[in-house]
Each structure stands twice: as structure tokens, then as C-alpha cells.
Image (cartoon, rainbow, N blue to C red):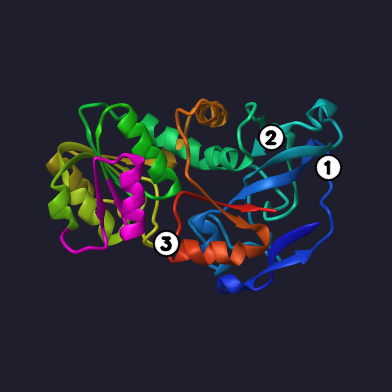
Amino acid sequence: MYATRLHSFGPAENLRYESVPDPVAGPGEVRIAVKAVGVHFIETLFRRGIPVGPHPVPELPATFGAEVAGVVESVGEGVDPGLTGLRVVSAGVTSGGYASLAVAPAGSVTVLPDGLDHGVAVAMSVTGVTTLGLLEAAPVTASDVVLVMAAAGGVGTLLVRHARRVGATVVGAAGGPAKVSRVRALGANLAVDYNTPGWTEIVKKASIVFDGVGGGLGREAFGLLEQGGRQVVYGQASGEWFRPAEEELKERDITSYDGIGHLLGRAGGLADLRRRALEAAAEGVLTPEVQAFPLAQAAAAHAALESRNTMGKVILVP
């Protein structure tokens, strides 16, 4: 099979598309013929040799990619052979998903609804689950003014669409004219470029901020929250987290949610959220934006993510 692997830490160009041995499904595992694999910003950090939180850098050579959608090609010992031939998605790949074949625990796969595109399924498997988890932590109502940071990203586009669907007033903030235009097309009531000085004066105020950017922009977005508002932190596209001090939260009566912490500590796990996310996509209730690159061009996908020049969920297609 072919896979894109990393042999030395460094720039995106270090990712190498090459022929490697086929992985074999062991006991309790399935082998999936990959049709789409998700790419995450955190993988660009690992590629550079930067550990993230409790996650160490990978051993080399490394094949990134934990979430794939495709067709079960074979099963290991102890696995229901009825899974063979089914279209599935898994966010638990153990062999590396930047490949034409991938191995995952049988318990990690979810059968796809009929007709659901593989790329959309990958987007909803993690990005969609994240979105539903954030909305579970801080539900949006029609009376809210919602500021979505990184609104042209995978989670951001879904948040914009959901907030508009429930009748909220939605402000989508993104970087650059092309992304702002895309956010406006998604249905945001107001789309602003947060790379432009004075952007906060255009927005004025918000009752909820979904912050996937962090850093100085996260601080500026937080400053727009009205008394009693809610902040949901889920990303650091700027390269650093922004978390307000407890004293500031108390002074302004603002509730701050750790979106990723909520997901990781969620009672009962994420299986039900994953099913709901896939069903929402199949029914057209939540439709993700997907930007696809060929598997052989994984380096270009990483470079685009690092330059913040992508829209929606980035995937690779073998």
C-alpha cells in the first residue's frame, strides 16, 4: 500500500509519500480500505517535534491520522465477519490513517448512514462530535448574540450554521477577505476580519464566544462578552491558549467552559455524539465544509493549515 510518513521532524516537506507493507488486522481489529482521512492542526505540531499537553511526540518513522472513513476490507480474530464490506468511520486508528489501508479496533467503528459521503463522515467523526459537545456545554438560543472565532474552520462553520438554524444573531470572525466572504455565505449576520485593526468595534458585544483561536485574538473576543456572558474555549489556532483569570470571570459574571475538557470527561463517552453527528449530516441538519487534498499531497495540506489558508475540515483522499 501507499502511505505518507514522517522520517524526521521539521517542515511539511518532510512528509514522504511512499510504498510500505500492508497492515494486518490483529485480534479485535478491522482493516479499512481508506476513502478519506482527517487532518488536524495538532499533527502539524507533532510533525515539527513539538509535544502537546500530555501527548509526546511520535516515534519515527510516523504515520499520522487517527480518523478515517472507508470500507472494512478484513477482520481479525474475534471480530464479527459481518462487518466486512460495510462502510464505516473510526476515530481510533492505530496504524496511522495517512494511508490507503488502516487498522482500528472493531469497537471504534461506526457504520455510516446510507448515502453519506466518506469525506463528510470523517469531518463529522471528530469535528462534528466536537461541535455537538461544545453546544452541549453551552447551548445556543434564539436570544443569543454568538461570536464564532475561526468561523471558516471545520468547527467554526458548523457552529455558524447551527446558531443560525436556531435563530441566534451570529457574528463570524475569520482571517482574510476570502474567509470572511465564505463566512458571510454560510449565513452569518455579520462577518468580520479579525486581522483588521478595530474589528472589535464593529462587533461591539456578544453573549457567547466560541474561541478556537486563543492568544491575543482570544483576549479581544473575550473583551466583547457582556455581563453574564459565556465563553467556550476549544482551540489555539494562534499557537497559544487564552484562558481568563478567575478574578476577571467573577468580576464580569462570565462563565468559561473548557470545551475539550467537557468532551474528554463526558459521562458515557462520545459514541452517542458520533452517531448523532453522522445522522445530522445525513439528514442535512449539519453540513460540514470539507477541503480535500490527495494523500500524496499531505505536505501541502499541512502547509495550508499552518498558514491558516484552509476552509472547513481538511481531509486527505488516497
Residue ranking furthest to the right: 77
Position of 123 compared to 152: left or right?
right
Among numbered discs 3 and 1, the one appearing first in the sequence: 1
Q: Nearer the viewer, residue 316 or 276?
A: 316
Residue that numbered label 1 is attached to: 26
Residue that numbered label 2 is attached to: 88
In this view, 38 is above or below 250: below
Residue that numbered label 3 is attached to: 308
**Picture residue at 79% right of the left edge, 35% below the top:** 28
Spot occupied by residue 110 in the image (x, y as percentages of width and height)? 65, 31
Which numbered circle lies on residue 75? none
Q: Quadrant of residue 186?
A: top left
Check disc 3 and give the amino acid type: Arg
Among numbered discs 2 and 3, the one appearing first in the sequence: 2
Check disc 1 and give the amino acid type: Gly
Spot occupied by residue 238 in the image (x, y as percentages of width and height)? 36, 61
Q: How many angstroms separate mark 2 from mark 1 (CA)?
A: 18 Å
The reply to whether callout 2 and callout 1 are in contact (CB within 8 Å) is no
Residue 150 seen anywhere in this rendered image of the structure: no
Among numbered discs 2 and 1, the one appearing first in the sequence: 1
As helix, strand or loop, the secondary structure at mark 1 comes to: loop
As helix, strand or loop, the secondary structure at mark 2 comes to: strand
Check disc 2 and give the amino acid type: Val
**Picture residue at 63% right of the left edge, 73% below the top:** 14
Q: Is residue 88 magenta?
A: no
Q: Quadrant of residue 78?
A: top right
Q: Nearer the viewer, mark 2 or mark 1?
A: 2
As helix, strand or loop, the secondary structure at mark 3 comes to: loop
Q: How many angstroms separate mark 3 from mark 1 (CA)?
A: 38 Å
Range covered by the magenta-colored residues = 172-198
Spot occupied by residue 33 in the image (x, y as percentages of width and height)? 76, 44
